[in-house]
Image (spheres, rainbow, N blue to C red):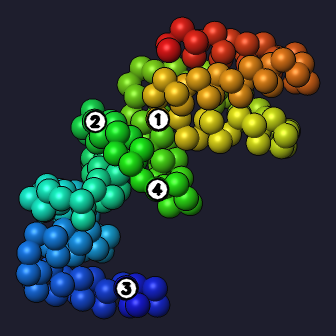
Amino acid sequence: MQAEVEGRDDDAGELFRRAWQAAADDYDACVAAHYVARHQRTAEQVLHWNQECLDRADRVGDDRVLGFYPSLHLNLAQARRDLGDLELAHEHFAAAAEYVRQMPAGPYADWIRFAIAEGRRATSVGADDPVRELLSNLCARADLKVLALILPAYVGDLGTQEDRLRLISALSMVHASRSLEDADQVAVGQAIRLLSAST
């Protein structure tokens, strides 16, 4: 880890490979495979090592690895996405979304949640995103107050009913304030209707 922090990636990769070779059990191998995956040069190798990590976690099968699953499925989803397999990527993003609820609250859980939500949006074939263009317009105008209300609900939306209701609620508050330009006011109303129809 120190080599990685110091930017000595080749050394870190070699040390993690040694840890993999020295693993005494599936738990050690799971942890080592996670770090080996971070130092691979091709998407195929990244996928291989992340799959190895998940397989080892499944073999451990106890509470020591429960907290790993959101990240494991996120890493597999991103590897699948990099390889162009959006269907399997979406499945792993969905699995990660199921496990992320078990993580303790905090910045790391938020980071994982936001990455999962972004991945789910990016791999949802044919799904409309009625909020993205609105957010783009608000960002262009630096409408910080409105953005501060909508963004947390949007970037953390994992597609659950609870998340969808949180996003609809934020949009409804903005809509009720009547503080937007006419086109954005209409866009917020349309987003609320579309999201409400999908819940």
Image disc number at residue 158: 1
Mark 2 or mark 1: name the one nearer the start of the chain.
Answer: 2
Q: Which residue is mark 2?
A: 91
Amino acid type, mark 1? Leu
**From what the image shows, is residue 129 above or below residue 119?**
above
Q: CA distance from mark 2 to mark 3?
A: 31 Å
Residue at image point 58% right, 41% down: 155
Q: Confirm or deny contact between disc 2 and disc 4 (CB under 8 A).
A: no
Three-letter code, disc 3: Met
Front position in the image: 105 or 40: 105
Percent position (x, y) of residue 5?
Answer: 46, 85
Q: Mark 4 or mark 1, which is nearer to you? A: 4
Residue that carries the numbered disc 4 in the rendered image: 104
Q: CA distance from mark 3 to mark 4?
A: 23 Å
Tell me the CA gap for discs 1 and 3.
31 Å
Q: Considering the numbered disc 3 on the image, is that residue within a helix, a strand or a loop?
A: loop
Where's the N terminus, which quadrant?
A: bottom left
Amino acid type, residue under disc 2 in the picture: Glu
Name the N-terminal-most of marks 3 and 4.
3
Q: Which residue is mark 3?
A: 1
Crowding at mark 1 (Cα within 10 Å: few <14, some 14-19, many 20+): many
How dense is the environment of label 4, judged by Cα within 10 Å: few (below 14), some, or many (20 and up)?
few
